[in-house]
Image (cartoon, rainbow, N blue to C red):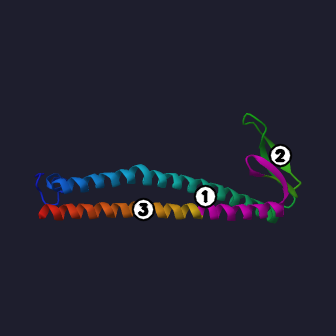
Amino acid sequence: MNEKSTGDVAYERKQGGPQSDTHQARITQIEEFINEVLKRDLRELEDWIGQYNQEIMEFVQLKNTLQTFDAHLPEGYKTQVNIGSNVFMQARVTQMDKIMVNVGKDVFLEMSMPEAEHFSDVRIKILTKEADVLRDESIKKRTQIKMSLLAIGEREKLMQQEARQ
């Protein structure tokens, strides 16, 4: 491709003089900020949102399981229990009035079915609110990236206008 082709911003940047160098330095600075700060922050936020969504789904699954037990299995159910080294044994659960619920940090509490359902509802609401805050932050980061890209575009337009003069 001819080095002087129209629309070749890199060529115009090279030929623009000292003002163009200032614009180019600022564009490079903005690009580095986008890539090294904003995109990294956005990835971290997305990872956190994914973790929150995973935890929300676990509590939704717990709630659905409890409702299924209550509605369809009031006398208990059969299951397989890992007794160690991935060796399973058939078991029958007959007492459905109390269950052990992981309340966090691998701390388990004995709860009744209604208490466990209420606990699940509360955790789902809390986690959803926290995830919503992170989603709002993610939207702000995306907006900052778009605004930075617009700033780059404006600087490039200025460079092109100065090169024409």
Image x and y of residue 72, in percent: 80, 63
**Residue drawn 80% across and 60% down?**
116
Q: Nearer the viewer, mark 3 or mark 2?
A: 3
**Quick one: SS at disc 1?**
helix
Horizontal arrangement in the rendering, residue 161 relative to residue 61 (left or right)? left
Residue picked out by circle 3: 144
- Is residue 108 shown in magenta? yes
**Quick one: SS at disc 2?**
strand
Horizontal arrangement in the rendering, residue 122 relative to residue 9 (left or right)? right
Of labels 3 and 2, earlier in sequence is 2
Above/below status of 105 relative to 141: above
Residue picked out by circle 2: 91
- Measure the alpha-carbon separation of dots 1 and 2: 32 Å
**Residue drawn 24% across and 61% down?**
156
Q: Nearer the viewer, mark 3 or mark 1?
A: 3
Q: Which residue type does callout 3 highlight? A: Gln
Q: Residue 42 versus residue 157: which sits nearer the camera?
A: 157
